[in-house]
Amino acid sequence: MCTNAVQAIAEQSRLAARQLSSTAESLRNHALAKMAGALESVKHQVMEINAQEIVKARDEGQSEAMIKRLTIDDKTFQYMLSRLNKVAQLPDPLNRILAGHTNPSGLRVYKKSVPLGVIGIIYESRPNVTTDAAGVCIKSGNAVILRGGSEALQTNTLLTDAMIEGVVSAGLPQHAIQIIRTPGHEAVGELLKMDEYIDVLIPRGGKGLIKRIAEGTRIPVIKHYDGICHLYIAADANPEQAIAIAINSKCQSVQVCNALETLLVDKQCAENLLPLLQTAFASNKIELRGCDATQKLLPNIPLATEDDWHTEYLAPILSVKIVKGIEEAIDHINHYGSGHTDGIVTQSLNMARQFEEQVDSASVMINASTRLSGGGDYGMGSVVGISTDKLHVRGPVGPDELTTYKWVAYGEGHLRG
């Protein structure tokens, strides 16, 4: 795709964003309902095209993890529709008064939420990102440019065309949702140059993709490089609860960014708890790698290296370390963690508060699975990713997170003295 074609898309998105910024909440919610209806009408075609792309991906030797992310089955499709409906039910993220006051002179000043403008989403594999991103952007009054992976190009295009039909039938601008329709890296390279039109880029995919995007553009990027998530089992943890949380955190879905990668077990409970944990993980076909102290209790597991503490496996592998109390656990997490999601299992409110206050992560889980750190469980409906940055957003990125603000002052002929 040539520079002119990408620039035309970016320019159209900028114009659409200006129109969207002043649309009523009822109109945006109506558009989301129309989008869901339009998707439902093309479900058969979507499933058919997706099946063809899965066959092609397998023929090209793609991994089973990639195939799983690429696949749309009936459950996934219904989930995609439900996300659009849920995001429509959320409170309006726009035109909220965030702060305000009246000066002694009578000048009324307030700060209100407004859209960011044009959002570029660059992602791999998952066709559900297509619908999630479009839904979150429409809800928050932003125009969106989608660029999915070539392995799902036809699926993503079909989904996008249906949603465009939905927004147009609801009375929103046609270019509120657009997709780059050509494979290859050239179009992405051109998109990264469009800082005059695109306000924010959100890459969804592996660390390599995110790094390339962040280093290749002047456009602000909302990103997360790693999900090196920890769970600390404190000395006073209920053993049954601790095992259940650890297993769910790791095994519910090993290939996702909020899956557990390092388990920290307090020295005081390790002797009794680690053999039980080993049995539970073995039944889920998880390979354990342990520190020296862990190996003494579980002598048949490999030694964890320094690289293991830095690794996001996204696979059935878990590193285990015995720690001497909560301070050592917190120090380990803040040193090796990626700031994504980290949790503690404890019956002590004071220990939970210490962990909450001192662990520097976007999500801190107290007696809960790390797998719960997402937009759905946080009541956000759809999200377009999870940020481990601190500016401008942190954690799950939903409609509220795709807004900024403006200052407004109402006077009655007020002048600067």
Image (cartoon, rainbow, N blue to C red):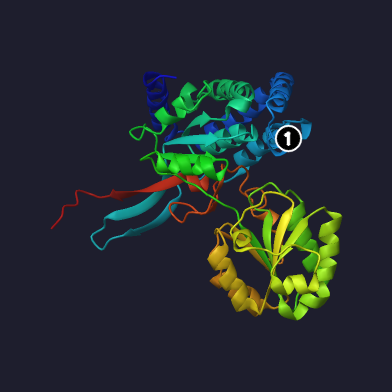
Q: Is residue 406 left or right of residue 281?
A: left
Compare residues 231 and 279 and report the one nearer the observer. 279
**Residue 3 placement (x, y as % from top left):** 37, 22
Q: Nearer the viewer, residue 205 or 416?
A: 205
The C terminus: image quadrant: bottom left
Q: Residue furthest left?
A: 417
Q: Residue at x 76, y 62 (%)?
A: 245
Q: Residue at x 50, y 43 (%)?
A: 210
Where residue 308 appears, x then y in whole percent? Answer: 63, 59
Q: Where is 393 relative to 51, above or below? A: below
Q: Give the image quarter of residue 352.
A: bottom right
Image x and y of residue 362, in percent: 55, 59
Q: Is residue 130 visible?
A: yes
- Rendered location of residue 14, percent (x, y): 39, 29
Give the residue drawn at x 19%, y 48%: 413
Which quadrant of the figure has residue 189?
top left
Label 1: which secondary element: helix
What is the total number of numbered labels drawn onto the structure image?
1
Instruction: Decide which of 3, 289 is in the foreground and name it.
Output: 289
Figure check: 266 above or below 174:
below
- Amino acid on which disc 1 is placed: Thr
The 10 Å Cα crowd at callout 1, few under 14, some 14 to 19, many 20 or more, is few
Q: Which residue is mark 1?
A: 76
For the N terminus, which image quadrant? Answer: top left
The answer, for residue 173, to whether it is visible in the render is no
The answer to whether 89 appears left or right of 200 in the picture is right
- Residue 403 left/right relative to 411: right
Q: What residue sits 59% from the left and 72% below the top?
A: 330
